[in-house]
Amino acid sequence: MKIAFLLFDDLTALDVIGPYEVLARLPGAEARFLSPDGKPVTTDDGLLGLTPGGSIDDAPDLDVLVVPGGWGTRALALADEHAALRAWVRHIAQDAQVVASVCTGSFVLGAAGLLEGKRATTHWNWVDDLRKWGATPVRERVVDEGSIVTAAGVSSGIDMALTLAARLTAPMVAQAIQLGIEYDPAPPYDAGAPDRAPAEVRSLLEARYRGVEVG
Amino acid sequence: MKIAFLLFDDLTALDVIGPYEVLARLPGAEARFLSPDGKPVTTDDGLLGLTPGGSIDDAPDLDVLVVPGGWGTRALALADEHAALRAWVRHIAQDAQVVASVCTGSFVLGAAGLLEGKRATTHWNWVDDLRKWGATPVRERVVDEGSIVTAAGVSSGIDMALTLAARLTAPMVAQAIQLGIEYDPAPPYDAGAPDRAPAEVRSLLEARYRGVEVG
């Protein structure tokens, strides 16, 4: 099973490392990281370099593709220089079992034409913007439309990948991976969703995100 | 507030990326990744290169140090070539507000002499081995001994970092970060702890880990 994780400049590291830490452990997985040109990329805060195993040209076909989010998704969705990347994502989706996104990675799927008429999600702050790519925005942690699976913000990729792991192999395998990474979450606060976080916490973030476009 | 995340060869990426994605977002944080010699490192499966911002020699003092786990912790804890790394961890701990570990990173803390007489945890499969460094092994997700904080396996670093974020700044800040990374976990199975995973899942992993020493 050929699985790839897309890397690009200004990505959010946890978006991609969460699903990778689950899916790369699948028995028989041939997993790799790919960047558009095969060169290293830098995270959205400039603190960490990530070196992939190859470029998108090294992967003409895949069983599973995971596209993370981060500020860099806007360029991937819209810039002329990334037209080849969008065409590659569209091509991969023709035969892949699953093309999945985490956080604002869904805008890259949208720009590749994969969300038209589909239910989809992304980070809670930008979910309505998915309409611009023809999707029906949904506020769920994982939205499974069969060959297209989108997940909510940043950390949701772990839940999404466990769901995929069970589908691609067996529930027992997903559970073994969950136990291996000791994913028994116990957040000290119940503030991870906008409808349950304190109002002032939500306002703080909304103010910070105001006017920021991601795709 | 100077915060560093240690990188080394054969680390588990999620161990370090989870806490980084929380703590690097703290207001006023001066965060960086460091490797022993400043050179890039490779994850435990060889799939991803991680390029730090400097070496441990660039950081004579820190407020917060996070040490992740992975197969590479055994070399860090025991190999002669890593004596300087262990001395540096010990030195940093003298003035830091917190030295924290995720998963088998606790063995590096142990080898640096920081766990003697303290309660500590690590990945569930290796928790009893903490005795060899003078610690009292505890099966909890986050073990807070003040200036030394240890977390359980791989994904537990996210919970640990949110706990630390609240302590280092304020609960409101930790909650804003939690909402920013949409950490509202919803694993599809309840298999993340050895006492709740199906017995055959646990046996499968125990067989795989048998004889593997991590520190």
Image (tube, coloured by chain):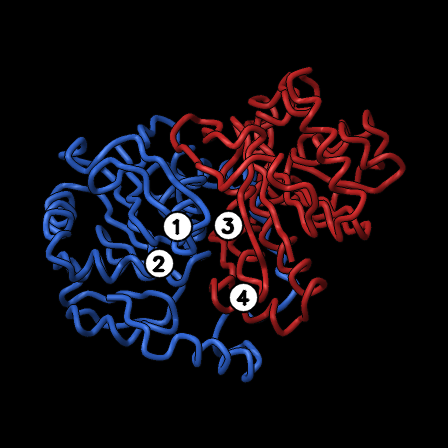
Chain colours: A red, B blue
Distance from the alpha carbon under mark 1 to that under mark 4: 17 Å
Amino acid on which disc 4 is placed? Ile
Who is closer to the viewer here, B18 or B37?
B37
x and y, in percent, of residue B125 in the image: 38, 74
Disc 2 crowd rating (10 Å Cα; few below 14, some 14-19, many 20+) is many
Foreground tag (3 vs 2): 2
> Mark 3: which amino acid?
Tyr
CB atoms at circles 1 and 2 under 8 Å apart?
Answer: yes
Mark 4 — residue? A177
Q: Secondary structure at mark 1?
A: loop
Look at 58% across and 30% down and name the residue there.
Answer: A36
Could you say which disc has been placed on residue A189 in the image? 3
Three-letter residue code for mark 1: Thr
For this view, does B30 lie left or right of residue B184? left
Pointer 2: what residue?
B70
Q: Residue B140, percent across and down? A: 38, 67
The number of callouts visible is 4
